[in-house]
Image (spheres, rainbow, N blue to C red):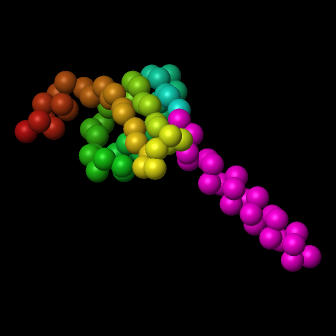
């Protein structure tokens, strides 16, 4: 009985650990609100209403510290307000 529980726990840990370590790419069609929220959380920058993601590359598999590059379209008026 204890071995089955241990095998289940180890399997869950191994499957769960791999989830965030893959490289992936999002384009303007797949860059959703959830990914835009992740960008805000990771960078500490609050994006204005109307901002939309154009491209995102997440690199997690080949590095110790996962990183990403994102291209975000910000409406002109909001961009000018952010610059101030």
Q: Is residue 48 found left or right of 27 in the rendered image?
A: left
Regarding residue 33, the answer to whether it shows in the image is no
- Vertical relation: 6 (above or below) 28: below
Range drawn in magenta: 1-23
Magenta residue check for 18: yes
Residue 34 position within the rendered picture, expressed as x and y whole percent measured from the top left: 48, 41
What residue lies at 27% left-to-right and 28% top-to-bottom? 74
Farthest bottom residue in view: 2
Q: Is residue 17 found left or right of 50 in the rendered image?
A: right
Quarter of the figure with the C terminus: top left
Residue 39 placement: quadrant:
top left
Residue 66 position within the rendered picture, expressed as x and y whole percent measured from the top left: 44, 46
Regarding residue 13, the answer to whether it shows in the image is yes
Kindly report the secondary structure that dominates the magenta region of the rendered protein. Answer: helix
Residue 42 position within the rendered picture, expressed as x and y whole percent measured from the top left: 36, 49
**Which of the pair 56/83 is nearer the observer?**
56
């Amino acid at each position: 009985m204890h071995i089955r529980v241990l095998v289940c726990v180890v399997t869950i840990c191994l499957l769960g650990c791999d989830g965030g370590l893959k490289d992936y790419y999002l384009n303007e069609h797949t860059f959703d609100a959830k990914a835009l929220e992740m960008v805000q959380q990771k960078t500490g920058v609050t994006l204005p209403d109307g901002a939309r993601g154009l491209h995102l590359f997440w690199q997690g598999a080949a590095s110790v510290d996962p990183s990403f590059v994102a291209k975000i379209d910000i409406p002109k008026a909001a961009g000018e307000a952010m610059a101030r």
